[in-house]
Amino acid sequence: MINYSIILFGYMGVGKSYIGKKLSKKLMIDFIDLDNYIESHEKKSISNIFLEKGEVYFRNIENKYLESILNKNLKCVISTGGGTPCYSNNIELIKKNKDLKSFYLKTSSNQLSNRLFPEKEKRPLISSINSKKELNIFISKHLFERNVFYNKADYIIDIEKKNISKVLFEIKEKLT
Ligand code: S3P
């Protein structure tokens, strides 16, 4: 069994929760999805938090819940929200924690826009974008800004054109 936690970064739609869940099963450790954790503690969906309280409120509680999870010193896999490493002092909290290995799950804006367009209603940051082309432009710019933070992860895993077994294999390879 590993004696540290794993935290996954990456853009919306890259599969952080899906991959995180599978990875935790494989490693036989717990899984925490930060967005779900926030929703269950706030008793509201992320969309409703954005709608009722706004993004600044969301970023504040995202920071607070991340810190409280990290303070528990659990051995688990944590999947973050797409913006988590890019706001507050989250990246510093993560990087200074010696019991945490971070992974950036990376793919192209094309793959992201194909995945996200059909389910954009659930994502407050992109729900008002009307065409796939516009979404692709938005994601390309957004990724460019966010990559500064995502690239601070300990490891970068390119997931494009890889099935789940290959992605898990590549992550596990970094853990030995
Ligand atoms: C966000 C991503 C979402 C959620 C919120 C903000 C972002 O998480 O935290 O809507 O800023 O990219 P997912 O990446 O799990 O969709």
Image (cartoon, rainbow, N blue to C red):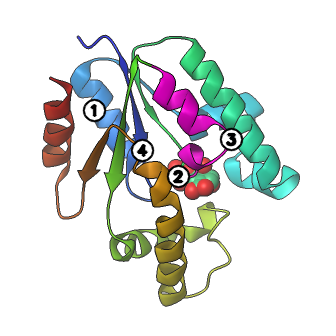
- Give the mark nearer the N terminus: 3 vs 2: 2
Q: Can you say whether 71 is above or below 128 in the image? A: above
Q: SS of the residue at dot 4?
A: loop
Q: Nearer the viewer, mark 1 or mark 4?
A: 4
Residue 60 drawn in magenta: no
Image quadrant where one finds the C terminus: top left
Tell me residue 53's x, y (percent): 86, 50
Q: Nearer the viewer, mark 4 or mark 2?
A: 4
Cα distance in 3D space between marks 1 and 2 = 18 Å
Q: Residue at x 35, y 16 (%)?
A: 4
- Give the mark nearer the N terminus: 1 vs 4: 1
Q: Nearer the viewer, residue 135 or 36?
A: 135
Q: Can you say whether 51 is above or below 128 in the image? A: above
Q: Mark 1 = which residue?
A: 23
Q: Mark 2 = which residue?
A: 82
Q: Mark 4 = which residue?
A: 152
- Give the mark nearer the N terminus: 4 vs 3: 3
Cβ at disc 2 under 8 Å from ligand 1: yes
